[in-house]
Image (cartoon, rainbow, N blue to C red):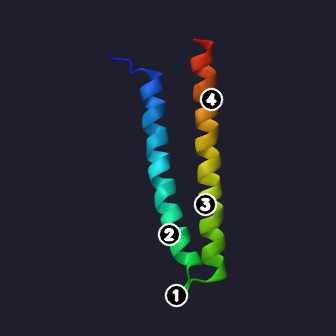
Amino acid sequence: MSMEDPFFVVKGEVQKAVNAAQSLHHRWRELLQGGSGASKEEIDWTTNELRNSLRSIEWDLEDLDETVNIL
């Protein structure tokens, strides 16, 4: 059984999360620029999802930093 380096596992997870956050950010900007006929609910939902995504990425990076500092 092969064990992957945890750094690269977390790096991959963070990269996926960053890609998703970038997509959300793009959509959020489109909604705020208007013209899309977006509802307040859609704007609020996208804003909350983007915030949550960024918080999650921040926590993952903090955990990774703590782990690296232990080593």
Question: Residue 16: percent from the left, percent from the top?
Answer: 44, 46
| In this view, 30 is above or below 57 | below
The alpha-carbon separation of the residues under discs 4 and 2 comes to 28 Å
Q: Are marks 3 and 1 in contact (CB under 8 Å)?
A: no
The alpha-carbon separation of the residues under discs 3 and 2 comes to 11 Å
The mark nearer the N terminus, 3 or 2, is 2
Q: Which residue is mark 4?
A: 63
Quadrant containing the C terminus in the rendered view: top right
For mark 1, does the 10 Å Cα neighbourhood hold few (<14), some (14 to 19), or many (20 or more) residues?
few
Q: Where residue 47 is drawn, which disc sits there?
A: none
For mark 4, does the 10 Å Cα neighbourhood hold few (<14), some (14 to 19), or many (20 or more) residues?
few
Question: Residue 5: percent from the left, percent from the top?
Answer: 42, 20
Tag 2 secondary structure: helix
| In this view, 35 is above or below 44 | below
Residue 52 placement, left or right of 27 = right
Q: Where residue 27 is drawn, which disc sits there?
A: 2
The alpha-carbon separation of the residues under discs 4 and 3 comes to 21 Å
Mark 1: amino acid: Gly
Q: Where residue 35 is drawn, which disc sits there?
A: 1
Q: Quadrant of residue 15?
A: top left
The mark nearer the N terminus, 2 or 1, is 2
State the residue in front, 42 or 34. 34
Give the residue at x 46% y 33%: 11
